[in-house]
Image (cartoon, rainbow, N blue to C red):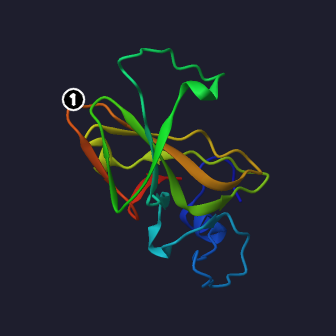
Amino acid sequence: MTGGVLADWEIEALVHVSYGDGWSKTITRPPLIYPMNPSNLNSFGYDLTLHSEFMIPSFDLSKPTVLDPMDSSSARFIQFSGDYCIIPPNSFILGRSVEKINMPAWATGLCIGRSTYARCGIIANVTPLEAGWSGTVTIELSNSTPMPAKVYAHRGIVQV
């Protein structure tokens, strides 16, 4: 593997195809991403798919409070499942990837939002996928517009 951004063949060598329903295609390569859809692999990375489970903030605007990242009780969420989720104007939701990521000790992944959603004012925020980290990716989706916006489950949302 080379340093910096990986070449197409290096990205492909890191992908291991695995479906959450028990089906698995064994590939004798180091697993980095366990994708739901192998066609999400492209020459610039891998598109992570948005799961159908969402967390929607539940703020009581009649009792203004300060959201404190050091106090998890200051943010309350409602769980929601569906084929899509509406993000209220000037608000956000939390989602997660369908795929499980298993970062090798020598690589850190960056997630960038898909332009399809960016053109609608939806901003995807994901912290770096640190070397050695494993799990599904939490994705914050912010609606920067004054109108409700829709995001779809089982569609590419960010690219690693």
Instruction: Check the image and report above or below for 14 versus 145.
Output: below
Q: Amino acid at mark 1?
A: Pro
Q: Please give the name of the residue rendered at 49% of the width and 38% of the height, measured from the top-left corner.
A: 77
Q: Position of residue 130 (x, y in %)?
A: 70, 44
Image quarter of the N terminus: bottom right
Identify the residue at the far left of this view. Answer: 147
Q: Position of residue 152 (x, y in %)?
A: 33, 57
Q: On the rendered structure, is 137 left or right of 155? A: right
In the rendered image, which quarter is residue 100 located in? bottom right
Q: Position of residue 74 (x, y in %)?
A: 56, 24
Q: Please give the name of the residue rendered at 72% of the width and 75% of the height, measured from the top-left corner.
A: 29
What residue is pinned by disc 1?
Answer: 146
Q: Please give the name of the residue rendered at 25% of the width and 43% of the height, measured from the top-left corner.
A: 149
Circle count: 1
Instruction: Check the image and report above or below for 139 versus 32.
Output: above
Q: On the rendered structure, is 152 left or right of 81? A: left
Q: Please give the name of the residue rendered at 48% of the width and 15% of the height, measured from the top-left corner.
A: 65
Instruction: Check the image and report above or below for 28 versus 114.
Output: below
Q: Position of residue 17 (x, y in %)?
A: 60, 76
Q: Secondary structure at mark 1?
A: loop
Question: Badge 1 local density, few (<14 within 10 Å), some, or many (20+)?
Answer: few
Q: On the rendered structure, is 121 left or right of 13? A: left
